[in-house]
Amino acid sequence: DVKVTQSSRYLVKRTGEKVFLECVQDMDHENMFWYRQDPGLGLRLIYFSYDVKMKEKGDIPEGYSVSREKKERFSLILESASTNQTSMYLCASSAPSGSPHEQYFGPGTRLTVT
Amino acid sequence: GEDVEQSLFLSVREGDSSVINCTYTDSSSTYLYWYKQEPGAGLQLLTYIFSNMDMKQDQRLTVLLNKKDKHLSLRIADTQTGDSAIYFCAERADNFNKFYFGSGTKLNVKP
């Protein structure tokens, strides 16, 4: 079974803090993704990576950066956390080939910025 | 990004059928997916349909695809209280395997 794990289920941080969210997958997937989920807005893509050290901006990259130094690990960084970054953060991975290319999701990290 | 739209809420009685609808805009999508999210959890793939199919049935689940109208639906037969969750429709774009998700439909099943 594919497993995607996220470092924390719940996190509380203060405004201005630097925040690291870690994601690890064990299926040797090339593609990894970070989304945020907000009520009524669904999932919005922040960043994705299709290979080690490669990254592409998603739809809402402002205020975030990412790091992919190893294939299995994809980190999301909030350089200076703000209250409007309070959200559920979901990590996912997928293989670029093979059918049906679905994404596998981690359990999510609920981040509260006070 | 692409637009994937769903209604936000659906309420049904236990034992009834549920139909969750979705519209999408990218006519080149090769796969369309339905994901289920239970409270406090990540998303799990429920089922998917390849774009050259009109229908796919998997036990209590039936997926219908109307490519002309870019309309996807998920029918759950004999809905149970355990089916209460948020259901997301998603399409996969051709480039870089990006996925576009709808806003999610919260299904409430009343006993």
Image (cartoon, coloured by chain):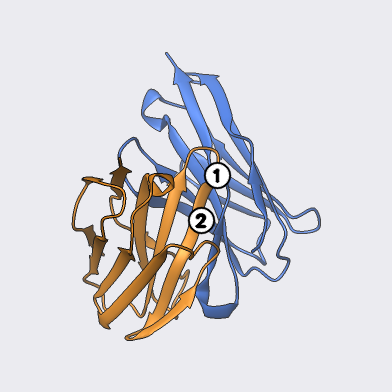
Chain colours: A orange, B blue
Return the residue found at the far top. Answer: B111
Position of A4 relative to B9 (above/below): below
- Residue B91 or residue A48, whichever sits in front: A48
| Element type at mark 1 | loop
Can residue B78 be seen in the rendering of this structure?
A: no
Q: Residue at x 43, y 53 (%)?
A: A36
Residue B76, percent from left and from top:
52, 35
Which chain is disc 1 placed on? Answer: A
Chain letter of mark 2 equals A
Mark 2 crowdedness (10 Å alpha carbons): few <14, some 14-19, many ≥20: many
Marks 2 and 1 in Cβ contact (< 8 Å):
yes
Give the camera-side residue of A62 and A104. A62
Q: Residue A73's spot in the image, x, y percent?
A: 24, 73
Residue type at tag 1: Leu
Q: Which residue is labeled 1 in the image?
A: A41
Q: What is the distance, in whole Å, between disc 2 and disc 1 at their CAs?
A: 8 Å
* Same-chain check, marks 2 and 1: yes
| Amino acid under disc 2 | Arg
Residue in view at x 32 percent, y 65 percent: A76
Residue A34, percent from left and from top: 39, 63
Q: Is residue B60 visible?
A: yes
**Residue pointed to by mark 2:** A44
Say which quadrant the N terminus of chain B sits in: bottom right
Dot 1 crowding, Cα within 10 Å, few <14, some 14–19, many 20+: few
